[in-house]
Image: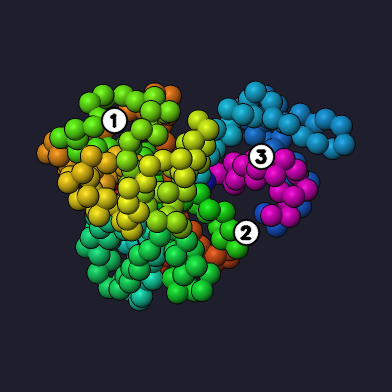
Amino acid sequence: MLDFRLQVFYTVARRLSFTRAAAELFISQPAVTKHIKELEAQYKTTLFERSGNKKIEFTAAGKVLLSHAEQLIAIYGELEYDMNLLNKEHGGVLRIGASTTVAQYILPKVLALFHKKFGSVNVQLITGNTEDIEEALLAREIEIGIIEGVSRSPQISYEPYLHDELVLVAASGNAKVKKDTLKPEELLQYPFLLREPGSGTREVIGMALSKHHIKLSDLKMEMQLGGTESIKSYLSHSDCLAFVSVHSVLKELRDNELRIIDIKGLTIERPFHFIRQHGQLSSLAELFIRFAKKQKID
């Protein structure tokens, strides 16, 4: 088991308060002080400094111990998770929602591996754009969602999952773009394909371009399409450009059907998030989130 004194230290470190740590751990404040003093005696150093108004701050040694404590707590959490898997039979229905890019290019592998390990769990997946999935969550049509946008609803808890990059692509035989790199202002010269309003991809692109004083409405939009597969197919028959997730074009890049065009001074990165309503998740939802985070995504 994890040394309880380390758990006390970690709780004090998160709260920066002996009083709040005591309340969270259901022990007395003198007990918290005793455990911290024992750690300080063991390592022959001071972990916290007390300043005015009863505030506490880390010492250099306290920061070092916190870094290691976080790693140890994570390791013990994984140990408990893996041991519990050996002793529990998981079954039931898990309703998941995923925005389009995640559903098409990230989740299939994860779901296949999850089913292989937990075959008695019936996963029901619905897809839509980011706005759709958030609405489904709030309507309790799903227990958890995975989205690609940057929306922030106060009714929803957002937990980072994976990082993604949006890249500018064109057909390898695109006759209008000969360069491998464009300046941001040169984007205004070419026809574009864009996702529909409410799409997390579209939202992220708009935010990134705005930093270069370019609005989505400034682009020459040739067509608005509702999914990445439609965009990729259209690109192969046109001289348009489009921003898509790099995860969605790995095959086309390998087969030399599409190529990436770099934009000077512009990289569009975004996180995928797990979303859920505030409060306790079901054991199946927690199981899926932890399982998904452990999988390697190619």
Residue 145 vertical placement versus 136 (above, below): above
Region of the chain picked out in magenta, as a range: 3-24
Q: Residue furthest left?
A: 255
Residue drawn 27% across and 50% down? 231
Mark nearest the camera among 3 and 1 is 1
The residue that label 3 is drawn on is 13
Quadrant position of residue 117 = bottom left
Is most of the magenta stretch helix, strand or loop? Answer: helix
Quadrant position of residue 12 = top right
Q: Which mark is residue 139?
A: none
Residue drawn 87% across and 32% down? 52
Label 1 secondary element = strand
- Label 2 neighbour load within 10 Å: few <14, some 14-19, many 20+: few
Q: How far is disc 3 from disc 2 in space, using C-alphas?
A: 26 Å
The residue that label 2 is drawn on is 154
Give yes or no for contact between labels 3 and 2 (Cβ–Cβ under 8 Å): no
User: Where does the image place residue 272, in percent across and percent down from the top left?
Assistant: 42, 49
Pick whichever, 288 or 240, lies toward us.
240
Residue drawn 78% across and 48% down? 19
User: Where does the image place residue 63, in percent across and percent down from the top left?
Assistant: 62, 29
Q: How far is disc 1 from disc 2 in space, using C-alphas?
A: 37 Å
Residue drawn 41% across and 49% down? 201
Label 2 secondary element = loop
